């Protein structure tokens, strides 16, 4: 009995080998000698993990994998990130954006072009409305000088039956409650960024 041709083998040291099965997704560390001195128990275990598939069995496994991928793809949303601003009201020392693009903010004119480009992409690729997700992102995306920027995105999404997710540090949510209530059916979720318990979060994420 020998390993299927698709198995990736990587020697870790003199005693052990790493086995990777790209068809089943199995990853195992096994003694080198297991391949030449297998007990019935070892053989059954590795067989159950798909390491000894025949050519016919491998083809069948790949067909099942393709079917699973197609079923999964039917439900995977398309996500389009819209950066309203790279400004932020926090001064996190770990921030990679720092002062790179301070005072940057999307204009309504730019947003109109962005929404139209996304809509065109949807039409060209025949994507269902329910699979379209807009992610409002930043900086801190709610640190905009004009509340109409957020309103425009939410309203544009609502008109097209797209879903919206808002990634925020949470500090300015109360300033937009009226909009969030109005478009509650359009907003599918908030991703509030937190760094651990209060004392750690507050130390790592001070207000500017």
Image (spheres, grey):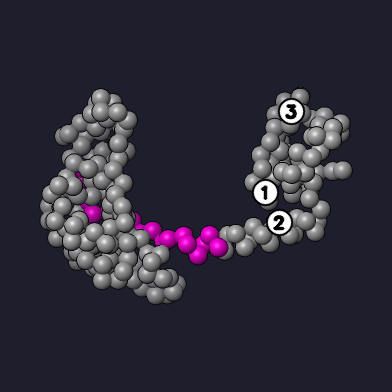
Position of residue 31 in the picture relative to residue 195 (left or right): right
From the top left corner, tell me how far across and down residue 55 is, in percent.
Answer: 80, 56
Q: Is residue 11 visible?
A: no
The quadrant holding residue 51 is top right
Q: Residue 117: which numbered mark, if any?
A: none
Q: Residue 16: which numbered mark, if any?
A: 3
Q: Is residue 78 magenta?
A: yes
Quarter of the image with the N terminus is top right
Q: Which residues are magenta?
A: 71-88
Q: Which callout, 1 or 3, points at the residue further toward the start of the chain?
A: 3
From the top left corner, tell me how far across and down residue 5 is, in percent.
Answer: 78, 49
Look at the picture and state if 22 lies above or below 90.
Answer: below
Q: Residues within 10 Å of mark 1 (few under 14, many from 20)?
A: some
Q: Residue 61: which numbered mark, if any?
A: 2
Element on which disc 3 rests: strand
**Mark 1 = which residue?**
24
Q: Nearer the viewer, mark 1 or mark 3?
A: 1
Q: Residues within 10 Å of mark 3 (few under 14, many from 20)?
A: some
Q: Is residue 195 magenta?
A: no
């Amino acid at each position: 009995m020998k390993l299927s041709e698709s198995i990736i083998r990587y020697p870790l040291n003199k005693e052990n080998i790493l086995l990777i099965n790209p068809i089943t997704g199995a990853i195992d560390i096994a003694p080198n000698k297991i391949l030449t001195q297998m007990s019935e128990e070892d053989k059954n275990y590795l067989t159950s993990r798909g390491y000894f598939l025949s050519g016919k069995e491998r083809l069948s496994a790949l067909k099942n994998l393709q079917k699973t991928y197609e079923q999964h793809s039917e439900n995977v949303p398309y996500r389009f990130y819209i950066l309203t601003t790279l400004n932020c009201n926090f001064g996190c020392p770990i921030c990679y954006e720092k002062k790179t693009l301070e005072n940057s903010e999307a204009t309504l004119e730019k947003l109109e072009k962005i929404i139209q480009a996304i809509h065109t992409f949807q039409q060209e690729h025949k994507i269902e409305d329910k699979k379209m997700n807009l992610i409002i992102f930043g900086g801190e995306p709610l640190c905009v000088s004009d509340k109409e920027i957020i309103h425009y995105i939410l309203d544009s999404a609502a008109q097209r039956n797209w879903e919206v997710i808002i990634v925020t540090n949470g500090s300015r949510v109360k300033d937009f409650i009226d909009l969030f209530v109005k478009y509650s059916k359009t907003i599918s979720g908030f991703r509030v960024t937190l760094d651990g318990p209060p004392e750690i979060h507050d130390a790592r994420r001070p207000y500017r």
